[in-house]
Image (spheres, helix red, strand yellow):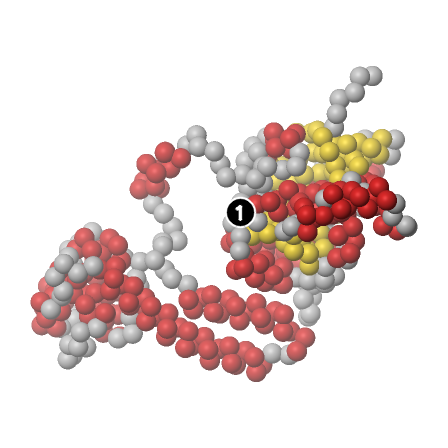
Amino acid sequence: MNDIIPTPETMLIGIALTQPKALDDIEHLTPEHFEDPDAADIWATIIHLARQGKPYNAATVSALGDHDRDLLAELSYTAPVGASAPYYADLVEWNAVRRRLQIAGGQLAQLATDTELDDIPATIETARQIVDDAVRLTGSVTSINAGRHFTEYLDSIGKPIDLIPTPWIDLDQLIGGWRPGALYVIGARPGAGKTLIGLQAAVGLQTHGSVLFSSLEMTRDEIQNRLIAQVASVALKSFESTMGEQQWKRITDHAERLADTNIEIDDRGSVTPTEIRSVARTISRRGKLAAVVVDYLQLMATPRGDKRPRHEVVADYSRRLKLLAKELHVPVIALSQLNRESTNRGDGRPRVSDLRESGAVEQDADVIILLHRDDNDLATLNVSVGKNRHGATGNFQLTFEGHYARATQHRWQPS
C-alpha cells in the first residue's frame, strides 16, 4: 500500500478515518476480510481503538500501530466524501468470499481424491460445510448486547410465539405447540405407540412446510400404509388382505390430500446424525423445512471405527440433533426407547430416568414426552410430559386407535 491505488479496501479505511460514525455499520469486518496485509493491520488498529472508545484518525492510528502517518493522512484526504461505508464494506466482503471460494475449490479437489467410496455420504456433507463456510457472510453479529436489545424485546413481550399446534389439544395445553429450534424426545417401550405419535405429529407439521421423517425401523411402504390408514381411516390390516370397496372409496375420497402430503421419507436403516443433517439441509434449500422426525434415536448407526461405548455415542447423537434444531430453526422430534426399569414398577409408568442408554438425552431435550399403555386398557394411551423447559409438566390420556395408526383426544364417558 506504499503507492496508493484506490481499491475498496483503501476507500473503506479512508471513510473510517474521517467518518467515525460510519464504523457503526461496518464494525463486523475483521482484518481477515482484507487482502492487503498493510490494510489488514490498519483495520485491526482502527477496530481496537473503536472498541476501547478512543478516537481513531490518522494521528491516533499511526501512534498506536506504528503505521506510516503520511500514508494514513493520504488515505484520509482521498476518502470519498459522503460515500456509503456499507457499500465499500460489501465489496471488501465479497472479495474475501471469492478468495475463500478459491481456497475451498482446492480443498474440495483434495477431499474428492482422498475419500474412500464407502465414505462418500459423509464426504458430501463435509464438502457442503466447506462451501457454506466459504460463502458465509459476517454482516450480522453472532452475539447481541442485552441493553441494546432491551427496547426491541420489550415490544415483543405479550405477542404470540411462533409455535405450531400439535394434533392434540391436551398436549398443547402443556407445551404450547412445537417450538422452532427445540428438541422433543418421545420415549416409550416397544409397541406403546411412539412411531404412531411421531408420524401423526409429522402429518400435522407438514401443513407448515416439508417434514423429514427418518425411519430407521420401518420401510417406506410401511410408513405409507400408516399415512393412508391415519388420514383415510382405513384399517392397517386391510393392506395385508384384499381391500374392500368401502376402503377403496375412503382412499379415493382422500386421494388429493394424500397426494399432497409434504413428508419426505428416508427409510435407510443405518444413518448417522450427519447424514440426517445432510438430507434436512437439502430439503431446506428446496423450500421451507417445517420439522425433522427421527424414528428412533438408539437405531442410528455408529460411524466406522468409532470405539466409544454405546451410551457415549447416543449422548453425542442427542446433542447433534439439538444443534440441528437450532441450526435449521425447526422442531426436531426424536423417538427413543425406554429401558426395562418401568416394567418392574408396580404401576408400570415410565419416568424420564428410563430413557435408554443415555442420561444426556434428558439434558439435551427441551421437552420429554413419555408414552404408556396398561395391559388391561390397551385402548388408552397414557401421555406424560416429564420435562418441559418452557412450561408445565403433567399427564393426560389419548384414545389409542392402533388400527388407524393414530391417537385421538380421549373422550370422557360416564361410568
Residue at 19% of width from left, 67% of height from top? 11
Q: Residue furthest bottom?
A: 113
Q: Quadrant of the C terminus?
A: top right
Q: Position of residue 284 (x, y in %)?
A: 54, 57
* The N terminus lies in quadrant: bottom left
User: In the visual, does 294 lie left or right of 163?
Assistant: right
- Say if 386 sits above or below 215 in the image: above
Residue 129 appears in the picture as rendered: yes
- Residue in the foreground of this view, choosing between 112 and 258: 258
Instruction: Note whether residue 32 is visible.
Output: no
Residue 317 in the figure: left or right of residue 253: left
Callout 1: SS: loop
Task: Work out whether residue 365 or residue 400 is closer to the camera in this orientation and state it.
Answer: 400
Q: Position of residue 89 (x, y in %)?
A: 27, 63
Instruction: Give neighbour class at mark 1: few <14, some 14-19, many 20+ (Cα, 10 Å).
Output: some
Q: Amino acid at mark 1?
A: Gly
The quadrant holding residue 145 is: top left
Residue extending furthest toward the top: 415
The image shows residue 118 at horizontal and vertical percentages of: 68, 75
Q: Residue at x 60, y 78 (%)?
A: 115
Which residue is under mark 1?
A: 181
- Residue 5, quarter of picture: bottom left
Residue that appears at 63% across and 63% down: 275
Badge count: 1
Name the one closer to the observer, 320 or 340: 320
Q: Is residue 204 above or below residue 280?
A: above
**Residue 372 sits in quarter:** top right
At x 46%, y 80%, the residue is: 106
The outermost residue toward the right is 241
